[in-house]
Image (cartoon, rainbow, N blue to C red):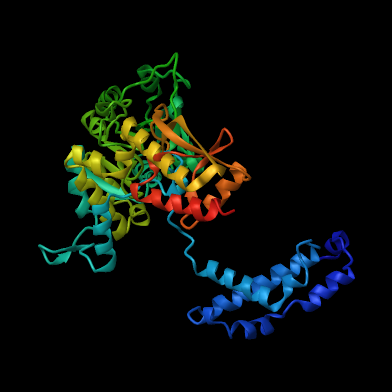
Amino acid sequence: MTKAKLQKKKLVPISPDQQALLRALPAVDSLMALVAKETFIESIPHTVVVNSIRKVVGHRRQQILDNDPAMNEDSVSDARMIEVVKNVVHQAMTPNLKRTINATGIVVHTNLGRSLLAPEVIDNLVTIAGRYSNLEYDLAAGRRGSRYSSVEELICEISGAEAALVVNNNAGAVLLSLETLARDREVIVSRGELVEIGGSFRVPDVMAKSGGILKEVGTTNRTHLRDYENAIGPNTGLLLKVHTSNYNVVGFTAEVSLRELVDLGAAHQLPVMEDLGSGTFIDFSRFGLLKEPTVQESVTAGADVVAFSGDKLLGGPQAGIIVGKKRVIDAIKKNPITRALRIDKLTLAALEGTLRLYRDEEKAARTIPTLRMIMLPLPEIQDRAQGFADRLKRIGGPRMHIRLLESASKTGGGALPLIDLPSLCVGIQIDGLSPNTVEKMMRNNNPPIIGRIEDDLFVMDPRTIQEDEYATIEIAFENRIMKA
C-alpha cells in the first residue's frame, strides 16, 4: 500500500470489547482440530473444510472490526463457530446450478433456464450422456463422420431447406453467417431492424465483429424497397432482414417483405439472409395466437440463409440453427470459426430428440413443454388455480388470505412481445409477514420457488408450474411460511 493510500485510510480505534472478542475468536488451526472430531466432515474433501473454516474465521473477524452489534461471546464460541462452519461446508458442497420452480408465468424465462425439454428427449439425453455414442462416427461406412449428420436431415425435412448447420446459439449463427458472406463488404439492413436483445447483444455490434460493414437504410418506422435498391453498390455483399422478435413498431409503418428482398437480391446477384431470432416451426395463429413468421415460410420465400434459436419458441436446447441454400451453407461450414462455435454431444442429443417431435405437429404441441404451456387453455388454468388455492387454504388457516387474480402470462425469451396469455393467478398474503418476506422465504426454499409480488401479494401463475410441483409448493408453505 502506498504512502498516499495509508494517509487516506481511516484508522478506527478498537474498543476493549472488540479486543476481547478478537482474542476469543478461534484460530484456523484450533477450529480445524475441533471440526475434525465432527462426523459431518467424514465425506467432505479436506480442501473444502479448510477453505470453509478460513472463510468463517475471516468473516467473523471482519464483523468484529466493523463493530457489528450481532457479535458477542456466543458468536465466537466453539459450538457456534462449528455450527457456522457446517453450514458453509454444506453450501460449498451444494451445486450452484439448482432446479427451481417457475411460478412467474413467464414461459421462456431466460433467468430460469429458458425452455424445458420433453420427457422423452431427457431420456435420450441421459443415455447419450452416460455412454459412448457415434458422435463423429459413420456406422454404415465404418469411418469418421460428421457430428451434424444426426440433425441436419431432420432440420431440412421439417424446414424444407436444402442444407443446415447447428452452432452454439443464434448470436453465433448470425456472427458466423455474416463473417462468411460479407466480411469487408457492406450489409444493407433497415434502420428499424437494428435490434438489441438481452445481454446487450446488438446487431450492429455483431456485424462489426464479423467484419461486415453496416449500411442502414430507411427510418425507424418506415423502410421501402427503393431504400435497399438505392443503397446497393459495388461493395455490397449481403441484404439482411432481422425479425424484431422482442418488440413491435405500430402505427405509421412500412417494411419490405422477405420475398421482395429475395427478388431484389436475385436481380443484383446478392445473397439474402434473415435473422429470425426466436424462430418457430409452428404457425401459432392456427392455435388462436398471433401470427409469428415460421422458418418454413422464410425458406419458401427463397432466403439464402435463415438463422434462429434452438431453444425459446422451438423448445429445445440452446443452439443456433442455420438453414438455407446448400452452396451457402457449405461455405459457412468451411469457415474456421465454425469449429469454435460447434455444439457438443449433449446439445445434439437434446436437439435431435426435440426435432423428432416436430414430425407430428400435434404431438409437438402436446409434448414440448414450451409449446404446451403457451397453448394451455384458460379453463384448464382456472381449474388449476382454484384447486391450488383450495389446498393452500386447508394448510394455511386464518393467517393465510388467498385471492384469485385475473392476469396475463408472457411468452418470454424475447418472443411474441404483443401476446398476453390470459391466466388466473393465486395471490397470497400472510398475517405478520410482508410479501417481500414471503418471496424471500420461497426463494430460499429447496428447491427455490420463484413467484412475483403484485398488489401487496405473493403471486404464483399456474401456467408455468408443472403438475408435480404443486405438492412441493404446499409443503414449503406449510413448513417454512406458516411456522415463521
Point out residue 307 in the picture as x, y percentages from the top left corner: 32, 40
- Answer left or right for 216 relative to 337: right
Nearer-the-camera pick, 424 or 93: 424
Q: Quadrant of residue 86?
A: bottom right
- Answer left or right for 443 relative to 309: right
Q: Quadrant of residue 217?
A: top left
Q: Is residue 389 visible?
A: yes
Point out residue 154 in the picture as x, y percentages from the top left corner: 18, 46
Point out residue 293 in the picture as x, y percentages from the top left corner: 30, 29
Q: Quadrant of residue 263?
A: top left
Nearer-the-camera pick, 47 or 443: 443
Residue name at image x 76 percent, y 66 percent: 71
Residue name at image x 39 percent, y 48 percent: 470
Is 77 rendered above or below residue 103? below
Is 109 rendered above or below residue 92? above
- Answer left or right for 90 relative to 178: right
Q: Quadrant of the N terminus?
A: bottom right
Residue name at image x 21 percent, y 30 percent: 300
